[in-house]
Amino acid sequence: MILRVIEVVGLILIGLFISTQMLIPALNGGILFPMFKKTGKLEAELAEATQEVKDATLEKVVAAKHQEAVAVKNEADKA
């Protein structure tokens, strides 16, 4: 009975380790095994900042397209 409990607890711990060190970082575009790297936190911040830059660039493109659409619509209304 005790061995079964130890086995279940061990499997749960292994599952937690795999999910926090491999699956979650892989899904979020981070680095694998961040607890073993000193630069893991900085690399995660860099990935987040890079994503913010991409988002801001896309927002700028979307705003420009909206303005272009309004301009085309105004020209169509004048004609």
Image: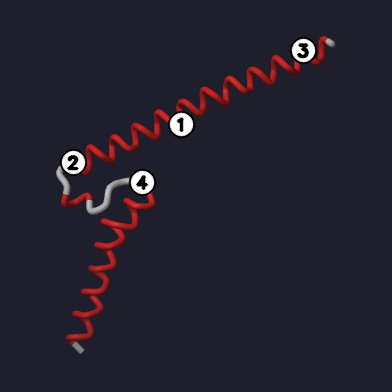
- Which of the marked residues, 3 or 4, is nearer the chain's N terminus? 4
Residue 22 lies in quadrant: bottom left
* Circle 1 Cα neighbour tier, 10 Å, few/some/many (<14 / 14–19 / ≥20): few
Which of the numbered marks, if any, corresponds to residue 75? 3
* Circle 4 Cα neighbour tier, 10 Å, few/some/many (<14 / 14–19 / ≥20): few
Dot 1 corresponds to which residue?
55
Q: Residue furthest bottom?
A: 1
Where does the image place residue 59, in percent across and percent down from the top left? 51, 27
Which of the numbered marks, if any, corresponds to residue 29? 4
Q: Which residue type carries mark 4?
A: Gly
Q: Which residue type carries mark 1?
A: Asp
Q: Residue furthest right?
A: 79
Q: Which residue is rendered at x = 28% and y = 36% of the image?
A: 45
* Circle 3 Cα neighbour tier, 10 Å, few/some/many (<14 / 14–19 / ≥20): few
Where does the image place residue 26, in percent across and percent down from the top left? 34, 52
Dot 2 corresponds to which residue?
39
